[in-house]
């Protein structure tokens, strides 16, 4: 499609897309344990990025595309991702934010829209291999809190979801 969204992908297309994403992240200096932010509208492309980050043993930090830019900047400062990946529909929301991370747009291929071209490759004490996902939640207080979810819990949830909601269409390999 012209808008970059996906009707369906074969298993081979998913695997190839994930491998391309991994290669691109590696050229930036992303390593296991690195925090990578994802800010996306409801778009199947983010699944490719999420799968690539999981395969690399990175921590995915999810951001709400409806957040005001000042809230997004505060959450970025708090969670300290080294890379922020945005979907094309919210490119204008992230273009002017102030952050020290590499800012990318992904619509099947990557485009760097930030000032930084690569990340600092030294291992940070905040980088953790056992955390698979970080999500901001307000709970009942309306004040955002960052929740860390273990890699094991993410994988178990993924397998439970794929049994209930198959990703691949029957007959498409």
Image (tube, rainbow, N blue to C red):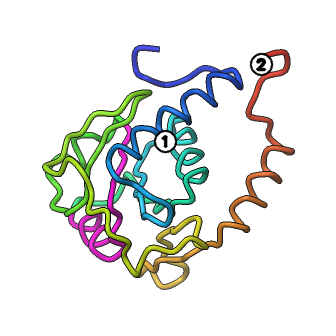
Residue 35 vs residue 103: left or right?
Answer: right
Identify whether 51 is placed above or below 17. below
Which residue occupies 63% across, 31% down?
15
Asked whether residue 75 is drawn in magenta, I would say yes
Mark 2 crowd level (few <14, some 14–19, many ≥20, 10 Å Cα) = few
Q: Position of residue 68 (x, y in %)?
A: 27, 60
Which residue is located at x 17 percent, y 56 percent?
A: 97
From what the image shows, is residue 59 above or below residue 74? Answer: above
Percent x, y of residue 109: 39, 28
| Picture layout, residue 54 above or below residue 11 | below
Q: Residues within 10 Å of mark 1 (few under 14, many from 20)?
A: many
Question: At which x and y percent is residue 157?
Answer: 75, 59
The residue lying toward the viewer, choosing from 48 and 125, is: 125
Please tell me whether mark 2 or mark 1 is closer to you in this view.
Answer: 1
- Secondary structure, mark 2, is loop
Q: Would residue 133 be found to the left or right of residue 65 on screen? A: right
Residue located 35% across and 64% down the image: 81
Q: Residue visible at 20% across and 40% down?
A: 113
Asked whether, in this view, residue 87 is left or right of residue 163, the answer is: left
In front: 97, or 121? Answer: 121
Q: Disc 1 on helix, strand or loop?
A: helix
State the residue position of label 1: 22
Q: Which residue is mark 2?
A: 173
Looking at the image, do the residues carrying marks 2 and 1 touch, with CB atoms under 8 Å apart? Answer: no
User: Image height check: is 173 above or below 22?
Assistant: above
- Is 110 covered by the magenta stretch? no
Seen as rendered, the residue at the extreme bottom is 141
**Residue numbers of the magenta segment:** 70-87
Residue at the farthest front position: 122
For marks 2 and 1, give the CA distance: 21 Å
Q: Earlier in the sequence, mark 2 or mark 1?
A: 1
């Amino acid at each position: 499609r012209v808008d970059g969204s996906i009707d369906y992908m074969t298993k081979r297309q998913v695997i190839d897309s994930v491998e391309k994403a991994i290669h691109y992240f590696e050229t930036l200096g992303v390593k296991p344990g690195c925090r990578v932010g994802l800010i996306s509208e409801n778009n199947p492309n983010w699944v490719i990025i999420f799968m690539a980050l999981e395969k690399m043993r990175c921590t995915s930090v999810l951001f709400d595309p409806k957040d005001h830019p000042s809230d997004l900047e505060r959450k970025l400062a708090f969670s300290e991702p080294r890379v922020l990946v945005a979907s094309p529909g919210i490119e204008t929301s992230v273009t002017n934010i102030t952050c020290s991370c590499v800012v990318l747009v992904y619509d099947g291929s990557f485009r760097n829209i930030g000032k930084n071209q690569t990340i600092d490759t030294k291992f940070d004490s905040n980088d953790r291999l056992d955390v698979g996902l970080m999500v901001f939640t307000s709970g009942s207080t309306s004040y955002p809190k960052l929740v860390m979810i273990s890699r094991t819990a993410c994988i178990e949830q993924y397998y439970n979801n794929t049994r209930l909601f198959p990703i691949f269409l029957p007959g498409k390999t």
